[in-house]
Amino acid sequence: MNELIQESKVAAFVEHLPQTMLAIDKELVSKAIATIKTTDFPTTRTEAWKYTRLARIAAISTANQTAREGKNLSREDIHSSYQITKDGLTFVFENGVFRSDLSSGEFPAGATIKPLTGCTKEELAIVGKSLTLENEVFNAMNTAYAVDGMYISIQDKAIIDAPIQLIHLITGKNTVSNLRNIIQIGKFAKAEIMQSYFALDAEASFTNVVTEVIVAENAHLTINKLQYEEEGNYHISTEQVDQAKDSTFTINTMSLNGTLVRNNLNIEVNGVNCMTNLHGAYVLKSNQHVDNHTIVDHKQPHCESNELYKGVMDEKSTGVFNGKVFVRKDAQKINAFQSNGNVLLSDDASINSKPELEIYADDVKCSHGSTTGQLDEEAVFYLRARGISEKSARHLMVSAFIEDVVTKIENEAFLNYTHSLLKERFGWDF
Amino acid sequence: MGYTENELAKDLENQEYKFGFVTNIDSDKAPKGLDESIIRFISAKKNEPEWMLEYRLKAFSIWKEMVEPSWAHVHYEKPDFQEITYYSAPKQTKKYESWDDVDPEMKATMAKLGISLEEQQRLTGTNVAVDFVMDSVSVATSFKAKLAELGIIFCSFSEAVQEHPELVRKYMGSVVPMTDNFYAALNCAVFTDGSFCYIPKGVKCPMELSTYFRINEGGTGQFERTLVVADQGSYVSYLEGCTAPQRDENQLHAAVVELIALDDAEIKYSTVQNWYPGDKEGKGGVFNFVTKRGMCERNAKISWTQVETGSAVTWKYPSCILKGDNSVGEFYSVAVTNNFQQADTGTKMVHLGRNTKSTIISKGISAGKSQNSYRGLVQIHKNASNARNFSQCDSLLMTDECGAHTFPYIECKNSSAKIEHEATTSKIGEDQIFYCLQRGISEEKAISLIVNGYCKEVLNQLPMEFAVEAQKLLAISLEGSVG
Amino acid sequence: MITIKNLHASIDGKEILKGLNLEVKAGEVHAIMGPNGAGKSTLASVLAGREEYEITEGSVDFDGQDLLELSTEDRAREGLFLAFQYPIEIPGVSNINFLRTSLNEIRDYKGEEQISAKDFMALVREKSALVELDAKLASRSVNEGFSGGEKKRNEIFQMAMLNPKLSILDETDSGLDIDALRIVANGVNKLKSPENATIVITHYQRLLDYIVPDVVHVLYNGKIVKSGPKELALELEEKGYDWIKAEVDAQ
């Protein structure tokens, strides 16, 4: 019986974190706290976490959260090192705290963009609307301990041309950052959002970000996401997306650095005639571990979803892909495609791939494919025979393999930035 | 005018289970329920040596600590293990010296199943040795003498325990340990009989070896074990067929099959499973919770082929452990579910050795309100250089009330491995049906043609006479035209 | 052979055939031509019994029977054959098995005996030669991996095997090169007899150089708007359809 009274490990983990000051529903916060008290960190016995061990996150000593005081940085530092494009609006957060002194750019017309700390209770009424708390400790932790985050609300019919950029920096040792973002795209509106995550003098720190997205009727939203926190840091990210009819949602996830990265993409397609695109690249080395966990839930007929994830694992790294497509009863005429490709460059690297289909309607076209292999040695030989060094030949082959998904990024600045990081970290040219 | 999906659904509902008859044979039963005394009773009934009883009791103590697995994509009321009869033998327990000695009623049962030995012989033109297991007890093994000339042992499991204890002790539990899973542990504790087969070094078994399983008594569970050992360089093709009578309650079948293919040996194991699937309301039917696994040593090959049309709930993953270098594992499966049937079936290919190869072809067909899942694991271990896997999992949906699901697990720890997995889900093609109709072919025949075409890659793997039976079964399961 | 009176048919609430009349007698070859969207393929589909089409008015008499009352397969068994514009692929089902099933079901319907394997194979050899179809194609899966020309030849091969009373060739010439066209047309001509009839639906006059029709009909806006001797096809080829449209629209 003692075990039941004992606090969960998660409760001990959050003990020294400040509870959220955001104007979100008190009942929701209480519910989140109740979940934290009664639920432990998932283990590999939990199907959704079968291939990802959380011991290193659970082991962070969270007692001292001094890093919150803020790094001495200037706008110029941000512009030169972290900003992906000068266009549009750039919001900077450090350890979940909004840094207006580092943020820049012009506010576009037809949109309300501000930090969550500046939002009213009414504006935050949608927080947690479709997010599961039960058994989801990271969602619960984020709900009860969210520091700040971005509030983006695009009016009906507004077309926002320049991207809205969110830069999150994690700094200091053992820092825990709970960042919460709210994105609402009005009817017939269009927007593009960039999220990038970096670490700066950070060590054993943990970013836990939850982004709630509502894409209204006939709206278009693209999210470009870049994860480049240094090794030794941990990152869990959840996107909860609700698509209304005739809408298009696209997300490109580039996971290039960070010791443990877990992405949960939960897309609920709640309207007819929707288009959903999920693309992801994970390029890993040393002992990195990246786990992409996606769910596309087709609840309405006449929709299409395309999913392409590709990974390259070198040294002792591990990639995980778990993609699930649901086609609910009566969601007829669904075309759902899912594809996962992996290349292992070292005998110590590994990949776990689990592309799943759960189909309850009959008039559907669904397929998935998964391939795992090494580089085509014949092709490598061919390149060498043309005078290219073996190393360059391999780089060329790997970059060609991953480029397939990287070029799904339509934003040129984001694409170039991704290429520059691949060059910086892996020495590849494109 | 034409054949609509609704009509098809109706046809599927209305067809009856062809093998739902009960054979009236007195049987020798243990009292219901399970405790140590029942295990002792079973062991005593079978005059087992002490080591066998100890093995059972150990398994029982392990089983008591285990919980029934719930990860499969099936929903059913968990069986009450105290409501099951664990031993039920046809009363006439004397050994059959020849086919003529077999109880005529039993012969009639076999004939009704379409598997009489004479017919088998006539059909194939070659000989097929058959072991017939009814309610857990092996009642007839044919061609024993002929096989013995080649040194092949083919007998009931009980007989093997008595007469070949060294082989049984060496191999039993070597592929599926008693701790493996809940149902395997239960089987180790209470198994009543099954088949045993040993092919000596270098011998190519000249005939198909075949076992037919049938649950007859009401309220009984069937817990049989099959152990096939193919010694170095040998070859055997093994067939297994299953039926059960129509009953309102759920019957439990928890079997364990272990295959051992030593260096350079090959085992081909084919199953046509047609346990009673329950009626069209989903009442009754067999719970088929089976552990099947094979071990491949160097250059060995194990090929599983299954045509699964029966059972209310199926939980079955015939697997290959590719331990030896250059070993090969294959899995060919057709799984049909109709009405309220649920199947969660697939395979595990565990690549341990170098240059190991596996192929998975799975064809699922869902009709009625059934749920049909493919669950498969391809695991490439660190030292399995140049491992290759190809998997193809297709699902065909016949109604808008059924489900087809695919849960592949791909785990790779070696960079030289090459793994390809493809899956598709689609509806039976209306255009294809119309094309057939326009050529004067009836709807039922059209569907049968299309479905058989869809399953061809798997059916082609079956020995000829089994393929005929399997095609008939598919037709029965899906067309509503009995016979 | 077939008499179509005032046939109206629609799909998804849209009327495609708007009062079509046509009579074809035994021994005759009729060509139906017309611009895109006139309803040519709809006519073929309706006669074969595709369910998506709703018959709202009219009648079709096929050798004394009400065709519209028959199921698709019974129409086929009564001797109506449709050569598909886009022949369907059926993976895993061999052409041979398919045809044997078809032939036997038709025989069964007529109360005739099943064909023996020997007679069947002899028939296959004889008829495949007619359309110069490689014997290997007969054992391959139905239309799977066939080239466009092979698929069309396979349709005529099936027609030869089943020996129908009325054959409807739906755009059988489309996509064929001149050699394949000649082979297909030859096959059709050889199968012609005083007891059977053929309706050739086509876009191009080209085919009619090889299969000479007794009557040419122009289908426009869901109706036969003009009928004439084979020379009409040449006129259409030369002048296009605009003059017919103008004529009809003027009325």
Image (cartoon, coloured by chain):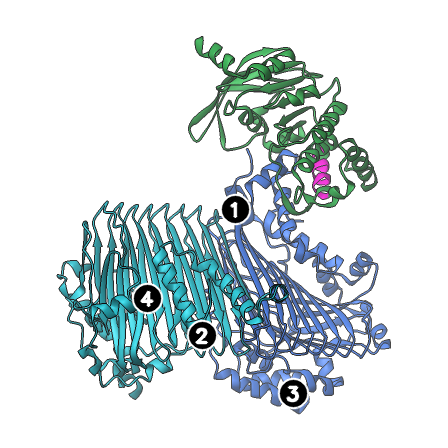
| Residue A51, label in figure | 2
Q: Which numbered mark, 4 or 1, is in the foreground of this view?
A: 4
| Residue A238, label in figure | 4
Q: Is there CB contact under 8 Å for labels 1 and 2?
A: no
Indicate whether A378 appears above or below A4: above
In this figure, which residue is indicated by the disc labeled 3? B52
Q: State the hue of chain C.
A: green
Residue B240 or A189: which is nearer the viewer? A189
| Amino acid residing under circle 2 | Tyr
Q: State the hue of chain A.
A: cyan
Count of numbered circles in the view: 4
| Amino acid residing under circle 1 | Ala
Q: Earlier in the sequence, mark 4 or mark 2?
A: 2
How crowded pointer 1 is (Cα within 10 Å; few <14, some 14-19, many 20+) is rated as many
- Taking the image as shown, residue A233 lies to the left or right of residue C131, namely left
CA distance for labels 3 and 2: 39 Å
In the image, is residue C100 part of the stretch drawn in magenta?
Answer: yes
Chain of the residue displaying label 2? A
Does label 3 lie on the same chain as label 4?
no
Q: State the hue of chain B.
A: blue
- Residue A252 seen in render: no
Q: Residue at x 52, y 78 (%)?
A: B182
How crowded pointer 3 is (Cα within 10 Å; few <14, some 14-19, many 20+) is rated as some
